[in-house]
Each structure stands twice: as structure tokens, then as C-alpha cells.
Image (tube, rainbow, N blue to C red):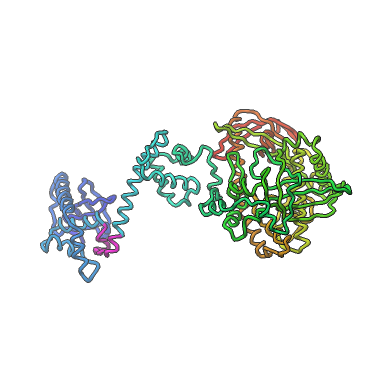
Amino acid sequence: MTTSGTIIEYLDSGRFLCALVLQDTGNRLRIFSQNGRELNLPAARVITTSRNTYPLSGSREQRIELLQTIAGKRTALTDEIPLQDIWDLASEEDQSAFPPDFLAELYFGSDLSDDQSAAFLRAVFADRFFFKYKNNQVTVHTPEQVEQLRHQREKEKEKEELLNTGARYLQELAKGEAIAPGEWPEQDKVLSWLADYYLFGSEAKEADLVRQLLKKAGLNRPHDSFHLLVKAGKWQQDENIPLLKADQPNAFSQELMAEALAIKEPTAEQLLTDPKRKDFRKLDIFTIDGSATRDYDDALHVERLDNGDIRVGIHISDVSYFISSKDHLFAESMERATSLYFPEGQIPMMPSELSQGVFSLIKGKIRPAISFLVTLSPDGEILRSQIVASVIEVKRRLSYSEVDQIMDKDSDLQLLNILRQKLRQQRVDRGALLLNFPDVNIYVNGQGEVTIHLSSQDSPSRNLISECMILANGVAADYLTAQEAPGLFRSQPPPRKRLISGVNNSLQDIACQRRFLSRGELTVHPKPHSGLGLNSYTTVTSPIRRFLDLAVQMQISHMIRGKGIFFSADECKNFAGTIQQKLGRANTVRQQRHRYWILRYLEAKVDQMVSALVVSHGPKRINLILLDCLFDIDLPPNPSFPVEPGDTVKVHIVRVNALDNTLRVEW
């Protein structure tokens, strides 16, 4: 029982309060606090109890004055207590826990007053470095605990300072104010945390701290972090967020660059020391690529033989001459899997010093190549093929548009054009699907304005290159198959539903057919590729840009020299798994970035009517394609506006936000 008139202390919101006990009712005390409140307090909340008692006969004001005087005296005493000195003495004792009064007497002496006893406990609660109070006992912290608590307190203080300073500077950034170099020492660190938080949310390393920082700065809207990073110059206005989120490599280490720069351009004499390498420098070899292309990994030549047959040479840059499977560049290429191309620039699979330099089939430069020599009848039937290591020199560099203009005047191009039509028709006769969807070419000018140009994949020049590459890749697959060698074979089961056939199909038919295609596969041994109309297929024609092609080239290059299989079936299986994983990552980045730029383009068309093609009609959704950018959209049926697949209609762009990845379209 607590005697009436006793002074007790309890904690209220972390603050010590004195109170006069009016009555003990068992588990609860009826008290009068120093704030003039009368209340029932659970007995368990009492921290200290005085030995002395005080009369209850005084007025309310007298009680308040008494309690506040005692509280003031205890607060003053608390500030004087040297806890560390007491801890030094207590640490020498054999035990680790003591009654509070025992420790208080180490400073105040044995004649301990109620105020001194209470002041000591107040000090213990105020400074938790040295002691811990629990169950009426004070535990003495070990030196290790004290050091740990000091370190924690320092970190908390640093954090508070960082929050206060960081919030102020973030507010300045948000207003567009410049921060002088060195003015905010933690700027790079905080902006790095901010970037991680924007990309990875709660999974970011300092997510909680950044949330507090943004809240303190009043900048906690969804994209405030993004705009701060742009204003700070850490990110661009159109930063490639999918690329950063995917952790796709986008720079080369110093070690890799040193390895790349050590690769030198070989002379013809050096290349021809290999007795298996043929000298094709006199052939009229040419490249056909886009006007902006800088990495040339394939070139062509064609010649009519004396007996009327036609020999086509598809010459592929021999990257396997320069690097081995043990090189860091090989491992890096496997990690990247492919080059990535965006409107704002490219992320090459290999350093541009190589991909646009010594590996590239540049006009007038001596280059090692793997040449696919295919002899065909005038009707386009393959009579025989040969794969050889070679030395070549490109004589002409042509663009697609140039080839389309001069095809009727150039005998080599005329001959190749005839062959490509025959080769394509043969594939179609074998069940190939020609899904020639136009290319969506996105351009961004210096002011960030986005324009889009559609170009046909089915122009004579593009189709010519496509058929020649399919021809070489098919020959490569057939060679590996005939040698019973493992490889990386691309295949595709028949479509789940076949809607088109032949050469000429509408955009709407092609768009519908694409929805019923079976997923392609990557296997160690050959399987049919129904989409291309081939019994076996691989890709070997882009070793500068695709790891799959590089690995297949290394396998074939080793075999045509009579050295046998280079990569075992198990190694090829491991390659296939890695390629599918890394390509999945790269393709996700590519698709998301493509969608971003389309939405950026459509932002300028808000409140406008644009043309769309009705692709398919379901009971709840109608699928359409925006014709100027070939972007898929879905709309609910509108009874007052009936449409059929193949119709061209106008739709209203209501709202677009590329950063939010949102598009709203209405009839």
C-alpha cells in the first residue's frame, strides 16, 4: 500500500511528473499531479515513491506549488549528477545490477534524500549510455555496450543533421536554385540514395531514410525524386529508367577497355599465315545497312558462274579471330547478350572501339571473315554450300535507300533481287509466315521533341538482306546438323492458329497473326522453325551484336579448321539458359523504353483525334493500332459506333503521361 500524502513520480509521454497520492485503491492510485489534474494511475506506472509524506489539507494551488517546487529541485539536481563517474565506480563491483539508491549514494552519500534518489533515476532515464532501469533495479552497462550506445547516438545525431540539411537543400533544388560546389558535402551521397529509392522503392538500401528526408522536405509525390535528380543534373529529362532498373550493364570497366584497346588491326599477311584462310580481297564485296549504321558485321558478293549457276557470298566479321572464350570480353558479351538501340543512343555488346572499329567490315579495310559461299541454280535452289575462313576488303558501302534507287541499274543487285524473291517464295511454299510489320523509327531532337517515321521492312533492299542472312544462318544450322555437333538452334512450333499465307498480307491480318504465334525455343540440337519454313536454324550473322551469334561462330570456326567441336553439348546448354535469361532482361528494357518514347510522342497529341486500325473485335474489348506509331490500344465496344476488323477509325487522345506509363484513349 502506498501511503496517502506520499510524493510519487511517473512518466507521461517521456516526461517525469510529480504527483501527490490521495488514495491507494489497490492496483490504482488516485493522485493529484503537478499539472493540477486529478486522475487514477495504475500502480505499475510509478517510478519513485518518497519516504516522506505531505499533508493533504492544503488548497489546490498550494498542492501545485509544492509539487512544482519539488519537480524543479529534482530537475536541477539531475543536471548535476555525473553519471559517468558513478558508472566508473559501479563497473568495479562484482555484480551488474543494483538498487537505485545504492548507486545514488555513490555520489550523494549515505544520507540520501527523496529528491536526490529521484534525481538519480531521472538522470538514468535521460542518459541511457551507462545504466538501464528495469524492475526496480539499475543494470550497469559493460564498456562495450557504452561504446556501442555512444556510436548509435552519434549516428542518430548525424542522421538528424543530414535530414535537416538535406531537406533544406532538396527544397532549394526543387525551386531550381543552384547549389555551389562543396556547399552541400553529402549531395552526391543523398542523390545516390534518392536514385536508388526511385528505382527500387522499399528495396533500396536507404529507403526509410529517404522517405523521412522527402517527407521533411515536403517532396513526397510519386515523381518528386525523379524531378529532383533531373534538376541536380544526375539524370536527364528522359532518363532511361527501365535500363537502370534492370541492372543491364551500360559501361565497360577499365579492365575491359584495356583488353579491347590491346586488340590491333591485322594485316592481310598476318591473316594469311593461316593456311585455311582464303584470300577474297579481289571480290566485289559490299555492305548494305541503314544510313546511320556504324557497326558492319555482314557483307555480300554475288557472281554468275560459267555454267549459269549463281554463287552468293555472305561474309561475316570473324570476331572469333580476335577473342577467345577465356577473355573477359567474351564473358561481358554473354552478360549483355545483345546490343541495345534506343532513340537517344545505343548500349553496345562490345566496346565501340571494337564494334565500330577493328571488328567492323569497314569499306577499304582488310578484315578477317567467315564466308558462307552458297551456290544456287537460276531458280534459287541450293546446290551446294561451303563455309570458309577468309580475308576480305569491302569495296562499296551502300544504304538501303541507295540500293532501292539503283537496284535496276546494278547487275549484282539485280541478280540478288531475283534470288531473294525466289528464296522467299520457297520459304513461303514450305509454310513460312511473312510478318513484315513496318519499323517504328523514333527521333528525338535537341529540344526533346519526338517524331516518328514508319519504314517498310519489306522494301527490296531490306528484304534482300533479310533473305541473305536467313540463307547464311540456315547453311550454318545445316552444317552443324550434318556434323552432329551441338550448337544453339532457334526453332518455333507451328502457330496456334494460322490466319495468313503467301507474300502479300494486310497490316490487320499480320497484326492478328502475331497474336497466335508459338513461343520460339533455343535448343542445343536442331528442331524445325515453322515461322521461317526451315528444318533447322541458328543465327551466326551478327557476332558483333549478339552473343548467340558469337558463340555459334566460334563453334563453326573451330570445326571448319578440322579441330573438332569447340563447345560441348553441356556448354551449349548452359549458354542457352544464360542467353534466354539475359535476352529476357534486355528485351524487357527495349520494350519498356519503346513504350516510353511512344507515350512521349503521344503527349503532344492530347485532345487530338488520331487514326487507328481495328485489329480484332471481342465481346468486351476492341483491339486497335494507332496508325502513326503502331501502338496497341484496347477500347470497350461503343454501341453507337459499331466497327469491324479492318476498319480505320478516329480515336480521341484524352490523357498521356510517359513517366507514369499511362494512356487514356476514347472513341
Kindly give the residue lying farthest to the left in the view shown.
Answer: 111
Q: Nearer the viewer, residue 571 or 77?
A: 571
Kindly give the residue lying farthest to the bottom in the view shown.
Answer: 94
Q: Indicate left or right for 143 with 281 as reference.
A: left
Instruction: Residue at 77%, 49% (x, y): give it.
Output: 313
Residue 523 on image: x %, y %: 70, 59
Residue 2 visible in image: yes
Kindly give the residue lying farthest to the front in the view shown.
Answer: 269
- Let me know if residue 139 is in the magenta part: yes
- Let me know if residue 267 is in the magenta part: no
Instruction: Residue at 59%, 61% (x, y): give it.
Output: 326
Q: Indicate left or right for 199 with 620 as reference.
A: left
Residue 28 visible in image: no
Kindly give the residue lying farthest to the right in the view shown.
Answer: 307
Q: Nearer the viewer, residue 577 or 283?
A: 283
Q: Indicate left or right for 529 with 338 as reference.
A: right
Q: Which of 97 and 178 is in front in this view?
A: 178
Q: In which quarter of the image is the C terminus?
A: top right
Range of the magenta residues? Answer: 128-147
Instruction: Residue at 18%, 60% (x, y): give it.
Output: 85
Residue 207 on image: x %, y %: 44, 49
